[in-house]
Amino acid sequence: MNRRELLLSSLAMAGAAVVGNAQAAEHKHDMHEHHHDAAANNAAVAATAADCLQKGEVCLNHCLDLWAQGEKDMAACAKSVNQLVAMCGALQQLANQNSKHLQKLATVAMAVCKECEQECRKFEKHETCKACADSCAACYKECKKIAA
């Protein structure tokens, strides 16, 4: 191989490397955009789950206080809110992590949110119960948008 052939071969290899790097960078950018879009789509679910979690914890405390004062009908509400708190914590985490399991969990979360909303509506004369019920309804709607 002479000097000219060596130079042309080296230039061809360098050109191929540049093209390969450009294609890899473009693919990485496309993957980033896809990931960013999915995370943005899950932001509403994460936000409603966080709100539901916060309002649910306040409602649960309220239910337990009333139950301790002898209002036994608060037991069912406390149980459904307790389940809601557990579900919304998981839902928020999976939404924030753009988990492949989010759609499946959203389906289950819809049932938990609906049950909790129904229980809390029975006591919506209490501000905390109404706030929890409203938050459950909002979370249900966002889960329905992504549920499997």
Image (cartoon, grey):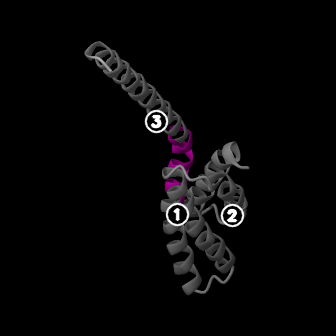
Left or right for 25, reference 118: left
Residue 73, horizontal then vertical, whole percent: 69, 79
Q: Mark 2 points at which residue?
A: 112
Kindly state the secondary structure of the residue where label 1 is placed: helix
Quadrant housing the N terminus: top left
Q: In which quarter of the image is residue 2?
A: top left
Pointers 1 and 2 in contact (C-beta within 8 Å): no
Pointers 1 and 3 in contact (C-beta within 8 Å): no
Pick the residue in front: 14 or 60. Answer: 14
Q: Residue at x 29, y 13 (%)?
A: 4
State the extent of the magenta-drawn residues as a range: 39-52
Q: Which residue is farthest top?
A: 4
Q: Can you say whether 73 is above or below 137 in the image?
A: below
Q: Look at label 1 and name its amino acid.
A: Gly
| Mark identifier at residue 32 | 3
Kindly state the secondary structure of the residue where label 3 is placed: helix
Q: Nearer the viewer, mark 1 or mark 2?
A: 1
Q: Look at label 2 and name its amino acid.
A: Val
Kindly state the secondary structure of the residue where label 2 is placed: helix
Mark-to-mark CA distance, 1 and 3: 26 Å
Residue 16, horizontal then vertical, whole percent: 41, 23
| Mark identifier at residue 89 | 1
Residue 97 is inside the magenta segment: no
Mark-to-mark CA distance, 1 and 2: 12 Å
Q: Nearer the viewer, mark 2 or mark 3?
A: 3
Magenta portion: prevailing SS class? helix
Q: Which residue is farthest left?
A: 3
Left or right for 133, reference 9: right
